Image: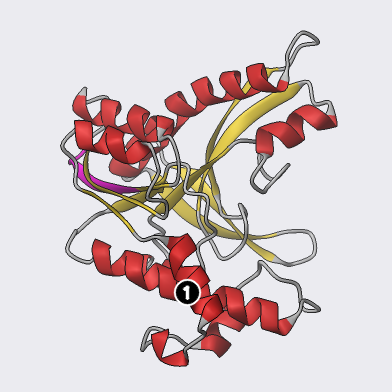
Amino acid sequence: MSDTIRIAALISGGGTNLQAIMDACESAAIDAEMLFVGSDNPAAKGLERAGKHHIPHFVADYKKIIRDFRNKPRENALPADFDIQDMRNKQSFFSGDADPEKTDFFLKSRAIAEAALLERMKDYDFDLLVLAGFMRNLSPYFIDRVNTDPHSPRIMNIHPALLPAFPGTDGYGDTFRYGCKIGGCTVHFIDYGEDSGPIIGQRSFAITAEDTLNTVKEKGLREEWILYPECIQLFAEKRLEIITTKDSRKKERRIVKIRAK
């Protein structure tokens, strides 16, 4: 068995993956304890789940923070350590020909919201942060303040598709509408892109002619509840290693190597 690691979670909605992880912690299926649950959404039902398990939970209301900044864009509202040029260079959500005002507004407003979240998180010494249905892209501002060692990422996400296919917010819907015969889910480490970080694990399921979008989502969720705790356990056992490779065009990419026990 590995040492017990301290994990934290961010959610936006119902928190079914959060529930699977909390249950796995309490049953000792994974060597982890949940320190806190944070959310961008005051109405997230997953906060109630955390409360029932007596886990500290809190909200940084992104919608309100972003609305307030849009209505009254004060530069002094930005975190003191915010560097817009550094964020422009690192982000990969927007292409080079994107509207610079739109890009800057996203980076500035997101950093303000993330600073509020980080303020609530600062008193907790966690080893791993899991995004369990957190429906906000994390900016480089947040990522760099959690991933303090670039060789040891510690933000995990679960995505409802077999990445690199179908990134974005509607993975199961995209999979179903494309006519795929196989669906699945992916756990990966976060990087500066959208669902582009190194893949840790995947699970798949068959899509039949009788399936609907709802049954595809149901199948996917069942696989997610198995996969996420498994990947957290690999992290707890220190079996995840980041390897840098080069593709046929000499472009560097990072992959996860799973060490043997």
Q: Is residue 233 above or below residue 78?
A: above
Q: Element type at marker 1? A: helix
Q: Residue at x 29, y 36 (%)?
A: 48
Q: Is residue 107 left or right of residue 121?
A: right
The residue carrying mark 1 is 68
Q: Is residue 3 magenta?
A: yes
Q: Which residues are magenta?
A: 1-9
256 or 33: nearer the viewer: 33
Q: Residue at x 50, y 56 (%)?
A: 190
Q: Is residue 140 above or below residue 133?
A: below
Residue lying at the far right of the rendered structure: 179
Q: Is residue 200 above or below residue 96?
A: above
106 or 6: nearer the viewer: 106
Question: Which x, y percent locates residue 87?
Answer: 55, 80
Q: Is residue 106 left or right of residue 213?
A: left
Q: Is residue 253 magenta?
A: no
Q: Residue at x 81, y 30 (%)?
A: 177
